[in-house]
Amino acid sequence: GAVVSQHPSRVICKSGTSVKIECRSLDFQATTMFWYRQFPKQSLMLMATSNEGSKATYEQGVEKDKFLINHASLTLSTLTVTSAHPEDSSFYICSAEGSSYEQYFGPGTRLTVT
Amino acid sequence: AQSVTQPDIHITVSEGASLELRCNYSYGATPYLFWYVQSPGQGLQLLLKYFSGDTLVQGIKGFEAEFKRSQSSFNLRKPSVHWSDAAEYFCAAGGGSQGNLIFGKGTKLSVKP
């Protein structure tokens, strides 16, 4: 149980375009989901906390107009990187919070902006 | 400020040898504590967690961790390492009502035959 999926697993897009990443909790409902960014050989940096039915809470330094988060249901949160630039290339990981405050992580999405 | 420190960036052990990965935390109160493992290009898998109670916690894949309040530590151990244990290990604190999960920088484990 407690499986989280992400789609796509890899995506390549051109500079200036937008890309959407989906995060789904497959066998449980998650009021709260989190979006992290991980640079090569580094730890996870929390970008934002996504709560179902309300606006996401962004961490300091994260542009909310660039990284749009929508948590429309208890099993789905989406992250849209708008007007992507090469410096947005990274590994994006989502997690969903379970009933015991555990976070269950998705497999990650590798974004490459050319 | 709240923080999680993993002093060892990279550790190499021989297959079959014992393992201890260190984790220290700085937190206002006793936090929820977690150990996650990440294989290359993959997400994070929860190995074990500590919320309260028994300070020795058993996890999956033969891992255990001991919470020591006096040392603000939550070290991960395994008595006999397998080659498949080679991965990146992250210690984390917080979560839920305690606020955002704070990750250490990770320790890369290599296993030599």
Image: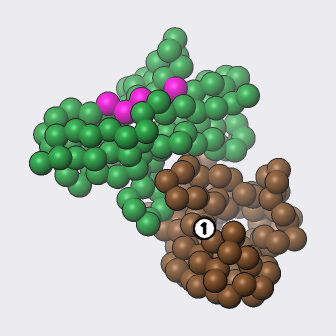
Chain colours: A brown, B green
In the rendered view of the protein, which quadrant contains the C terminus of chain A?
A: bottom right
Left or right? Give the position of B87 relative to A26: left
Q: Amino acid at mark 1?
A: Ser
The answer, for residue A26, to whether it is visible in the render is no
Residue bearing mark 1: A90
Choose between B78 and A14: the one closer to the eye. A14
At which x and y percent is residue B53?
A: 48, 24
Left or right? Give the position of B15 relative to B40: left
Could you classify mark 1 by the number of other residues whose Cα lies within 10 Å: few (under 14), some (14-19), or many (20 or more)? Answer: some
Q: Is residue A60 magenta?
A: no
Which span of residues is magenta-colored? B20-24
At which x and y percent is residue A62?
A: 80, 59
* Secondary structure character of the magenta stretch overall: strand
In the rendered view of the protein, which quadrant contains the N terminus of chain A?
A: bottom left
Element marked by disc 1: strand
At which x and y percent is residue A66?
A: 82, 72
Q: Residue at x 77, y 66 (%)?
A: A52
